[in-house]
Image: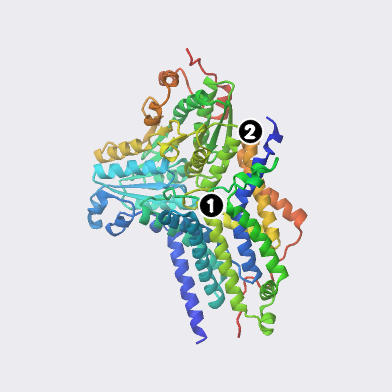
C-alpha cells in the first residue's frame, strides 16, 4: 500500500512534465498543424482540410514562423497569417504556422519547417533575423522569406517596409487633430522597426504642428495589454488627446483606455485597421500590407519565379498606407494636407526619418501651401 | 519638461492598479509557504484564472461570475498541486513548473477551440471602477479612488485580514507551526495535511483572483501570456515582505509604484534610454532587499514533503 502513492506520483509528474514539454519545447503543440483531425478544431484551413495528409508531399507547403509575439495581436502577425492562408487557398497549398514561445525556439522551429519539405518558409518579424540567416544558409535549397528585416542569402527574400512613410501621414493627421497640442505614442519594444514607426510619426506631427509635443513610452513587451492600457492612461492623464500605438498585443490595452476615456480622445494603431476596438475614438490606422507581400511571395514560389533579394515597400508600392474607412471620415481640410504629404513622399522630395538622429535633423517642407 | 510633474495623484492611482493583481497572488503564496509548501505555479494559475474569468463572463455576461469562476479554477489547480506535493510527495518545484507550462498551452488551445481566435479572446463585459462619493470628493486624493474597482479595495482588505489571521489567531499559529516543524505540530495533534491542503488551495484561489483582475477588471479580454511574469513578481514580493501578508502588500505597492514611475518618466521624456528605465522596479527591489529589509528567512519546512510515518 505504501508504494502506491510513490508510483502514482512518479507517473503523474512524468505525465505532467511530458504534457508540459510538448506544450513548450516542441513546435507540435504550439503549431497549428494542417492534418484534417486537428484542422477541424484549430484554425480553419480550407485547402488543408480537404486533402489527406499523405498526398501533401506533392503539394506546395507554406510555413510561417513567428517570434514569441505570435497570433492574436490584431495586427502584424494576424495579418501575415491571413495573407498566408489566402495564398494557401488560392494556390491550393498547405499552410502551417509555428509560433515560437521563446527566442531559443527560433532555430529549431525554422529548421523543422525547412525539413518539412516546405516550399516556402516565412519568418515574420525582425527578431528572427539571426536565426533565419543561420537556417537559410544550412538549407540552401529551401526558399525563405523574412519580413521586416534583411538577410544576405540567395535563397532568402527579405521584405522590409518603409513604415515611416505611412506613420508620417498618421503623424500629420494627429498633429492636425490634437487640441491640447500633446500627442502620445505607445511602443512595444524599442527595436529599430518600432523606432522607425515612431520617428516617422513624430516627424509628421511636427511638420504640421511645430508647437505639439510628442510623448513616447515603451512597454518592453508586445504581449502585455494591461501595461499598454496603463501607458495610454498615463499619456491621456498628461494631457495627450491623440495616441498612436505600435505595440501589437500590448497596444490592444491602449485601445481599451481610449474607449473607456470616451469621446474627445483619439487613438490609431499600426499594421491593420483596428477601428472596431474603439469606434468613437479611431483615427485612420497606418496599415502595412504584409499580407499582400506574403501572398505575392507565395505566388512567385508557385509560379517558379521566386528569387531571393531585397524588397522595400513604401507608399509608392502600396506597401503601407492609411486605413481607408476611417480615412474617408476625416474632414477635407485634413485630407488635402495628407494627400500633399503623400505625393511629396512618393516623389522622393520628403524622406521621413527612421531613427531618433534622423528625426533631430529632419526639416519638413511646408505642407500647408 | 518638469520632472516633478510626474508626481501627481494619477501616479498613485496607477500604482494601486498595477499592484492589485500582485497583492492577491502574493498573499496566497505567503500562506502556502507558511504552511510549508512552495507554489511556483502561481504564474500559471493566474493565467488560468484570467482565462476562466473571460470564458465565464463571455457566456454569463456578468464579470463577477467570471471572477468567481477564476477563484474556483484557481482553487482546483491549487488542489492538484496540493495533492501531488502533499499526498504524493512529489517535488514541489516540478509540479509547480508543470502548471506553468500547461498554462502556456491550454488557454491558447482553448482560444482556438472555443472562439477560433488564436492568441486573444473576444471582448467581454468588465468590472467598472467604483465611484464612492465621499472618497472621490476628498480634496487632492479624490482622483486616486476614481479609477479603482472593488477588487483593489478587496486586495488591501485581504492583506490586513490575512495578517491578523496568520499572526493573531490559533489557526495562524497552527499554519506557521506546520511550516516550521511539521513533526512537532503533528505530535501535538495538529492535522498537518489538512492545513497544508487548505493553504495551497487558498493560494490557488488568490492567484486565480489576481488573474481575473487582469482580464475582467483592468481589461476586458484574455490574451495569451497576459500575466507576463506577474506571478513570479508576486513570489518575489512575498520574500521581500518576509513571508507576511502586510509585508507583501508593501512590496507589491513599492513595485507597482516603481513601474508606474518609470512609465511616467518615459512619458514626459527624460533622456534615459527606455530599456534602462524599465529595469528601475527591479533595481529598486534589489536595493531595498539588500539595504533595508535585511535577512528574510523562509519557513524551515518549506518545500519538504511531510511523511506521517
Residue at 38 percent of width and 50 percent of height? B117
First along the sequence among labels 1 and 2? 1
State the residue in front, A301 or A66.
Answer: A66
Q: CA distance from mark 1 to mark 2?
A: 28 Å
State the residue in front, A24 or B13.
Answer: B13
Mark 1, other Cα within 10 Å: few <14 / some 14–19 / many ≥20: many
**Which element type, helix, strand or loop, lies under badge 1?**
helix
Residue B181: in sight, yes or no? yes
Residue at 61 percent of width and 55 percent of height? B22
Residue situated furthest front in the rendering: B133
What's the chain of the residue with tag 1?
A: B
Q: Quadrant of residue A276?
A: top left
Residue B6 at x, y = what percent?
67, 37
Mark 2, other Cα within 10 Å: few <14 / some 14–19 / many ≥20: some
**Which element type, helix, strand or loop, lies under badge 2?**
loop
Q: In the rendered view, does A132 fall on the left or right side of B186?
A: left
Residue situated furthest top in the rendering: A369
Residue B261: in sight, yes or no? no
Q: Quadrant of residue A122?
A: top left
Q: Quadrant of residue A42?
A: bottom left
| Disc 1 with disc 2 on a shared chain | yes
What's the chain of the residue with tag 2?
A: B
* B93 in relation to B107, above or below: below
* Quadrant including the N terminus of chain B: top right
- Which residue is the site of mark 1? B214
Residue B44 at x, y = what percent?
52, 60
- Which residue is the site of mark 2? B269
Residue at 69 percent of width and 34 percent of height? B5
Amino acid at each position: 500500500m505504501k508504494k502506491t502513492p510513490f508510483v502514482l506520483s512518479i507517473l503523474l509528474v512524468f505525465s505532467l512534465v511530458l504534457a508540459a514539454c510538448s506544450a513548450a519545447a516542441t513546435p507540435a503543440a504550439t503549431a497549428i498543424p494542417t492534418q484534417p483531425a486537428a484542422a477541424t478544431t484549430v484554425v480553419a484551413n480550407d485547402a488543408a482540410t480537404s486533402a489527406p495528409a499523405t498526398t501533401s508531399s506533392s503539394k506546395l507547403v507554406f510555413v510561417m514562423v513567428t517570434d514569441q509575439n505570435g497570433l492574436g495581436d490584431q495586427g502584424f502577425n494576424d495579418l501575415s497569417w491571413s495573407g498566408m492562408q489566402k495564398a494557401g487557398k488560392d494556390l491550393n497549398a498547405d499552410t502551417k504556422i509555428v509560433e515560437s514561445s521563446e527566442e531559443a525556439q527560433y532555430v529549431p522551429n525554422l529548421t523543422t519547417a525547412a525539413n518539412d519539405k516546405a516550399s516556402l518558409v516565412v519568418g515574420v518579424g525582425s527578431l528572427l533575423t539571426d536565426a533565419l540567416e543561420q537556417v537559410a544558409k544550412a538549407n540552401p535549397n529551401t526558399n525563405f522569406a523574412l519580413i521586416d528585416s534583411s538577410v544576405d542569402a540567395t535563397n532568402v527574400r527579405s521584405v522590409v517596409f518603409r513604415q515611416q512613410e505611412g506613420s508620417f501621414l498618421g503623424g500629420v493627421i494627429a498633429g492636425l487633430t490634437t487640441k491640447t497640442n500633446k500627442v502620445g505614442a505607445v511602443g512595444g519594444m524599442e527595436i529599430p522597426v518600432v523606432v522607425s514607426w515612431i520617428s516617422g510619426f513624430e516627424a509628421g506631427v511636427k511638420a504640421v504642428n511645430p508647437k505639439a509635443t510628442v510623448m513616447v513610452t515603451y512597454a518592453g513587451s508586445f504581449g502585455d495589454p494591461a501595461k499598454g492600457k496603463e501607458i495610454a492612461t498615463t499619456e491621456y492623464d498628461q494631457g495627450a488627446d491623440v495616441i498612436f500605438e505600435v505595440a501589437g498585443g500590448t497596444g490592444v490595452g491602449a485601445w481599451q483606455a481610449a474607449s473607456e476615456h470616451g469621446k474627445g480622445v483619439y487613438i490609431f494603431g499600426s499594421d491593420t485597421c483596428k477601428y472596431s476596438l474603439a469606434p468613437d475614438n479611431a483615427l485612420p490606422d497606418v496599415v502595412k500590407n504584409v499580407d499582400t507581400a506574403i501572398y505575392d511571395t507565395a505566388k512567385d514560389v508557385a509560379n517558379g519565379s521566386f528569387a531571393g533579394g531585397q524588397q522595400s515597400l513604401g507608399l509608392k508600392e502600396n506597401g503601407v498606407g492609411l486605413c481607408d474607412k476611417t480615412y474617408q471620415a476625416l474632414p477635407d481640410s485634413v485630407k488635402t494636407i495628407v494627400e500633399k504629404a503623400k505625393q511629396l513622399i512618393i516623389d522622393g522630395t520628403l524622406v521621413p526619418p527612421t531613427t531618433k538622429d534622423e528625426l533631430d535633423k529632419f526639416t519638413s517642407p511646408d505642407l500647408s501651401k | 519638461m518638469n520632472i516633478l510633474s510626474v508626481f501627481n495623484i494619477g501616479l498613485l492611482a496607477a500604482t494601486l492598479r498595477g499592484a492589485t493583481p500582485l497583492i492577491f497572488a502574493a498573499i496566497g503564496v505567503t500562506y502556502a509557504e507558511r504552511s510549508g509548501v512552495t507554489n511556483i505555479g502561481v504564474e500559471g494559475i493566474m493565467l488560468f484564472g484570467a482565462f476562466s474569468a473571460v470564458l465565464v463572463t463571455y457566456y454569463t455576461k456578468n464579470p463577477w461570475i467570471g471572477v468567481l469562476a477564476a477563484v474556483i479554477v484557481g482553487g482546483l489547480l491549487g488542489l492538484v498541486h496540493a495533492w501531488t506535493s502533499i499526498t504524493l510527495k512529489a517535488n514541489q518545484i516540478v509540479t509547480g513548473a508543470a502548471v506553468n507550462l500547461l498554462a502556456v498551452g491550454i488557454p491558447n488551445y482553448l482560444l482556438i477551440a472555443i472562439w477560433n481566435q488564436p492568441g486573444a479572446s473576444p471582448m467581454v463585459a468588465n468590472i467598472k471602477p467604483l465611484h464612492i462619493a465621499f472618497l472621490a470628493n476628498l480634496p487632492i486624493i479624490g482622483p486616486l479612488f476614481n479609477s479603482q474597482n472593488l477588487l483593489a479595495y478587496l486586495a488591501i482588505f485581504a492583506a490586513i485580514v490575512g495578517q491578523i489571521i496568520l499572526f493573531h489567531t490559533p489557526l495562524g499559529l497552527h499554519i506557521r507551526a506546520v511550516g516550521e516543524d511539521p513533526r512537532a505540530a503533528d505530535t501535538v495533534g495538529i492535522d498537518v495535511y489538512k492545513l497544508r491542503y487548505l493553504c495551497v488551495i487558498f493560494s490557488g484561489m488568490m492567484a486565480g483572483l489576481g488573474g481575473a483582475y487582469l482580464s475582467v477588471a483592468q481589461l476586458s479580454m484574455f490574451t495569451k501570456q497576459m500575466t507576463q511574469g506577474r506571478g513570479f513578481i508576486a513570489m518575489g514580493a512575498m520574500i521581500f515582505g518576509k513571508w507576511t501578508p502586510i509585508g507583501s502588500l508593501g512590496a507589491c505597492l513599492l513595485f507597482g509604484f516603481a513601474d508606474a514611475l518609470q512609465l511616467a518618466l518615459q512619458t514626459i521624456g527624460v533622456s534615459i534610454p527606455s530599456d534602462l528605465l524599465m529595469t528601475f522596479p527591479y533595481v529598486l527591489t534589489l536595493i531595498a532587499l539588500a539595504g533595508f529589509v535585511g535577512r528574510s528567512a523562509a519557513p524551515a519546512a518549506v518545500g519538504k514533503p511531510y511523511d506521517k510515518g
